[in-house]
Image (cartoon, coloured by chain):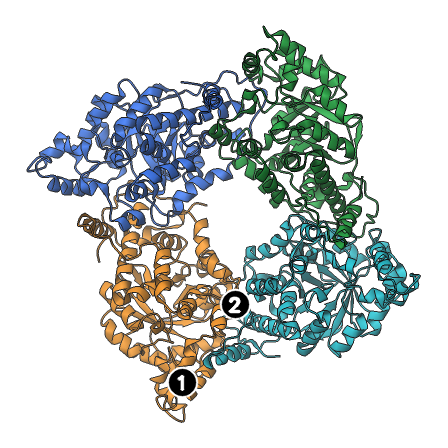
Chain colours: A cyan, B green, C blue, D orange
Amino acid sequence: MQNGMQRQLEIFRKGLLGQRESFPLSPEALEEAARAVLPPEAYDYVAGGAGSESTMRANVGAFERYRLVPRMLRNVSERDLSIELLGHRYPAPVFIGPVGVQKILHSEGELAIAQAAATLGIPFMLSTVSSYPIEQVAQVAGDAPRWFQLYWSRDPNVAASFVRRAEAAGYQAIVITVDTCLLAWRDRDLSHAYLPFMQGEGLANYFTDPAFRAALAQPPEQDPGTAIMHFAQIFGNPALTWDDLGFIRQHTRLPILLKGILHPDDAREAVRRGVDGIIVSNHGGRQVDGAIAALDALPKVVEAVEGRIPVLFDGGIRRAADVLKALALGAKAVLLARPVMWALAIGGAEGVQTYLRNFLAELDLSLGLLGCRSVAEVNRQMLAD
Amino acid sequence: MQNGMQRQLEIFRKGLLGQRESFPLSPEALEEAARAVLPPEAYDYVAGGAGSESTMRANVGAFERYRLVPRMLRNVSERDLSIELLGHRYPAPVFIGPVGVQKILHSEGELAIAQAAATLGIPFMLSTVSSYPIEQVAQVAGDAPRWFQLYWSRDPNVAASFVRRAEAAGYQAIVITVDTCLLAWRDRDLSHAYLPFMQGEGLANYFTDPAFRAALAQPPEQDPGTAIMHFAQIFGNPALTWDDLGFIRQHTRLPILLKGILHPDDAREAVRRGVDGIIVSNHGGRQVDGAIAALDALPKVVEAVEGRIPVLFDGGIRRAADVLKALALGAKAVLLARPVMWALAIGGAEGVQTYLRNFLAELDLSLGLLGCRSVAEVNRQMLAD
Amino acid sequence: MQNGMQRQLEIFRKGLLGQRESFPLSPEALEEAARAVLPPEAYDYVAGGAGSESTMRANVGAFERYRLVPRMLRNVSERDLSIELLGHRYPAPVFIGPVGVQKILHSEGELAIAQAAATLGIPFMLSTVSSYPIEQVAQVAGDAPRWFQLYWSRDPNVAASFVRRAEAAGYQAIVITVDTCLLAWRDRDLSHAYLPFMQGEGLANYFTDPAFRAALAQPPEQDPGTAIMHFAQIFGNPALTWDDLGFIRQHTRLPILLKGILHPDDAREAVRRGVDGIIVSNHGGRQVDGAIAALDALPKVVEAVEGRIPVLFDGGIRRAADVLKALALGAKAVLLARPVMWALAIGGAEGVQTYLRNFLAELDLSLGLLGCRSVAEVNRQMLAD
Amino acid sequence: MQNGMQRQLEIFRKGLLGQRESFPLSPEALEEAARAVLPPEAYDYVAGGAGSESTMRANVGAFERYRLVPRMLRNVSERDLSIELLGHRYPAPVFIGPVGVQKILHSEGELAIAQAAATLGIPFMLSTVSSYPIEQVAQVAGDAPRWFQLYWSRDPNVAASFVRRAEAAGYQAIVITVDTCLLAWRDRDLSHAYLPFMQGEGLANYFTDPAFRAALAQPPEQDPGTAIMHFAQIFGNPALTWDDLGFIRQHTRLPILLKGILHPDDAREAVRRGVDGIIVSNHGGRQVDGAIAALDALPKVVEAVEGRIPVLFDGGIRRAADVLKALALGAKAVLLARPVMWALAIGGAEGVQTYLRNFLAELDLSLGLLGCRSVAEVNRQMLAD
């Protein structure tokens, strides 16, 4: 992986040859470029949030209130972004977060993400509602690190099957999303009357799943309408409780993380239940309108967990500085989602790779400028009170 | 009543047939649509507030400062929005608030509201200054729950008569508005020189009232001008004090609530005086310019009341999340007003019904996503400090 | 004076005849209308402030942070806005603040103000740099209450003469402005290269003053250029200290107030020095750029004064609600300045009278709606913490 | 140096002759005027910051939260802006901050700055990456005060040589910038692929430096490309630590200040290491995106230093009021940078001189209006809590 200076030099050198990078640098410009190439309903599906979208805005806005206080003269000539997490070493404290049905953004969807991630070694999380099946995405990813995100189906056989398939396909952890037992009220999708799953998009894992297929009279290929309706009925599981977590444990040896924890009491419960990690998240502001900004929830969750399990962070990361703030507040790593999707939309695998190279370059430089040589050196003392 | 998932499915299914919902989903779009169809003075009469309208804006803005912290894995497959209040069960903690002279918004005015409310079982509050008389509205409402809002006339006979008529017509409670002893200075109405009552609008209850008619030399039908002037003289009652409350008690067995309480000392006094309930409200920012946002007043009133009588909330509710925040701060139910009026303006009874179905669907989903199965489970621990 | 309801009725009745009030109701509309009729440099002279104008904006913005909490059911059928202050009774806690050189806004300038104020009995403060002399303004004012604002000249004879003239002409108090020992840096005036005094405007009191004339070789009528230059040299007095206050005392029996106090230590000093009153003011944001908003300074000054002398308030009052907030924070009365000037610009004496009638009507209604029958009942408990 | 009143009078007198000042007075207008005359990449190079530019905006915004509370009646007829600092007296607590490669703004670049500064006696700081060499700039400056800003090269001989040259050329202090061990990620420059140094701009000190030249096979005049590449390799020094500071001490008797300190722990370390002064700065928001606003960092650094060494302030100063706020928070002097650069762009040396005359005039008046006769009288009690 290039360090930040190398990437800067590459860009400036091109400038000497009269070549400007055309890839958008700011997250705002990136989103704008994606919006220009996407059908409105696809753009809105990814860009939008629940209700008034107040939480979505709060996620991004919260970062402004936390300010870094850098240290000087600390010899940062060598910087190491890598982290150790749940038995694996990753090159940076950055994951590509799980986003469903990426085909609506780019024809190669999750395959492009896997390919770009693999090139850089950055781990990605594959959504349950992927456009391509678990195994096909794994094949593209090769040896590269990958996690699997689980929407726990109302049909326990399907849930168990997904987890087994993920483990078999080399995914390194199971991320159970717990904040989507119901689908939130989202104005944008409702006003477009657009839910891609209703058109069979994002159901690759289901249609290829033996347990799912076993519950159907006819295979999805022959009667997609019925298969879709069956999916709609078993997709979420609002009846889920803490007691159910043991069931998944029985079907995998992979570490299990819960994504969507915001309340410190839930974090404590997760520790008590033997969960392997927590991802603080409000689903990008897409589920509980009016919910606390993810960053504001982070410190109390970290405090509640008392260091017993790793806490990851998801929600509103747009810049390298945001990563550093989340780390300073106790996150072990962060998830990047919407910006990666915009990069996918405008440039496929290559777009994602360019985006990530820039993001990691900025992160490398920012870490050094903060006065740190490693992620472990970023701590609470580097934030203003 | 549909639950939220059923309503979502209905909308998305239409999408499969290429049909988008044309009814505006966001409150902003709803208001914009209403504005487009209304005469400016009618729009402004409902949309406007007192003085600088600072309180009106503060009402809505206050919700941003209170953030929900949802709980996970709590089995929310069955959700119950219903509440028990003053001896009745209502299907949701949501009332249609009292708004006067609805004919300026739609020719069917209060009748349309009553019809839509009855279809869904949602209780409504009929304003004293209704376009249609108490009894006619009751007839449309049938068995559906309804409350009566009283502007206490300077003529005690009229006030007493209104209350008796409401009780006779099946209204379940009397809501005495205490914040309108004088009419506030409202730039919009003054600059239009528009007060619908001066043209005889909104006086249906007066013109049909025996006590009111008894005070006139000629019936209103024959000399509307004099009747209107008499109305103007007896409409409000700035001399009202706590001691006067006993008078209304003598004329009805219905529970009596005070609408417009903001100061905790007034809340305590209300309890001492045996009032049956309080509605925290600043009249939608239409009375005291510069007043505290209703939501900011709520916690202290709830604290002052010490659970002895129910506290309802009115002021700035635009989204399901706002309802949950008010409930978390101690309100037993909330009043929805302006958005319902915009729905009335653009679609009459059907518009109101569509609006309410969407609102209740969002509320049902939001309750579940917050981790609650019932309204009673929403509490202060679900708000960030 | 009309009460608020009478004024409302007057406006709405006109509406029945198809007549709308053309006079702007909101302070923003009023300013806009004035801007449209004024030369840019005259508008900017009044509208502008020092430096970045941050203090000017802060003055107005500060009111948003203080919120009224009204009381209900208190019999407010009779409301009395009058106040007792320094031995006089005034009809409302509102003064027209001192603004210089009003001829640039309207040919009748201070005479129009005096006439409008006299009609309503509202006291006004005449600026030292008036367009018309002390005596002529007094003549128009007749029996109406008036105060005189003093810029303490570097020539003590002139300062003493002004004070004696004011007392002789029936002014009831001397307001010494202490925040203008130097003229602040004001971008707008500097970019227009516009200071009306340099053209002889606003010097009526000087040119008619025996002490001023005595210091000139030729009377101003014959050599205005020299007179103006002499004015420029003696106008302000940056050498002034607390010890000098005794000098003015020797020349008048009128109460003396200091206008421009912001620091509680200065307020304490004023009490120690036997000053009769304080006006908390930052000169409308026209002197110290970056200064504290006047309203934010008020509570500490009131606290420092411990009730020994009256504290008046000046700075950012735009609405009746602002008056109530200032009163609740301990002010005995407030000064209204820029809005009155805009009213003068668009309508002369009649414009000012219409503006004041509206303002006082709003104040009367707002007082009652706050639950108060008199100014004395407005207190700190009516503001949210 | 004119005092503020003299400068005001000069401008207003021109007005009498019908001449308006055409030089922009507000910093916003100044920047706009500069933008209009500059190539976009040059404008962006100076105007831009790191990452989201959040720190850059925070620098300016922070001043709004600190409010001055002026004192009255203190005899401010004589005001003295001068300060004593590190053995020298300077006419005002204002330095022109170091900005590199000023030729991209105006052909005379640093020479123009030196000339304007010399005319007024205002000290300037020459950047290491100047468009003109240390000695040539000194020659223009003559006897005028000047400091030298050092980017500590990876080649110690070059760093030592720069310091020796500066001392020999009459610079009075060495300002070591410690926050630029790496170049931050800056969207604007990267999107323009514009780094002026890559085109040889700003390398005058290097190309004329014996130590730099000694490391090259061929002199820069003959092979500029190689020289530039060598510069790029040795420019920054991310390996620098506190222990290295002693090295510079060995090569100069000048006082040494560190520019870029934000964390109080670093300030304490600087004191321990015998540094002569600190400049609180975040490099104008150009290095650590998300960093604390410079003004917010100032009080804690001042507290940590306990008065043992002077603390200067850099970051967001746009107005005289900003200077007073920084002084009140404990800064001994402040640096002005971007606005001076805009003045340079639109008017060369004369533009800078006009800008500074206006700025100092505003500062003189503001000091007096705050109630202070000297910089030493500005203290923490003049800020609102």
User: Residue B271: percent from the left, percent from the top?
Assistant: 68, 23
Q: Residues within 10 Å of mark 1 (few under 14, many from 20)?
A: some
Could you classify mark 2 by the number of other residues whose Cα lies within 10 Å: few (under 14), some (14-19), or many (20 or more)? Answer: many
What is the x, y in percent for residue D189?
47, 71
The local secondary structure at tag 1 comes to helix
Secondary structure under the numbered disc 2 in the rendered image: loop
Q: Which of D277 and D291 is in front in this view?
A: D291
**Residue B194 visible to an observer of this rendering:** yes
Residue bearing mark 2: A71
The amino acid beneath tag 2 is: Arg
Quadrant location of the N terminus of chain D in the rendered image:
bottom left
Instruction: From the viewer's perspective, tell me whether residue D162 is left or right of residue B142.
Output: left
Quadrant position of residue C257: top left
Indicate the position of residue A264 as horizontal and vertical percent values: 72, 53
Left or right of residue B82: residue D78: left
The residue to which callout 1 is attached is D157
Q: Residue at x 83, y 71 (%)?
A: A167
- Name which residue lies at 60% across and 17% down: B241
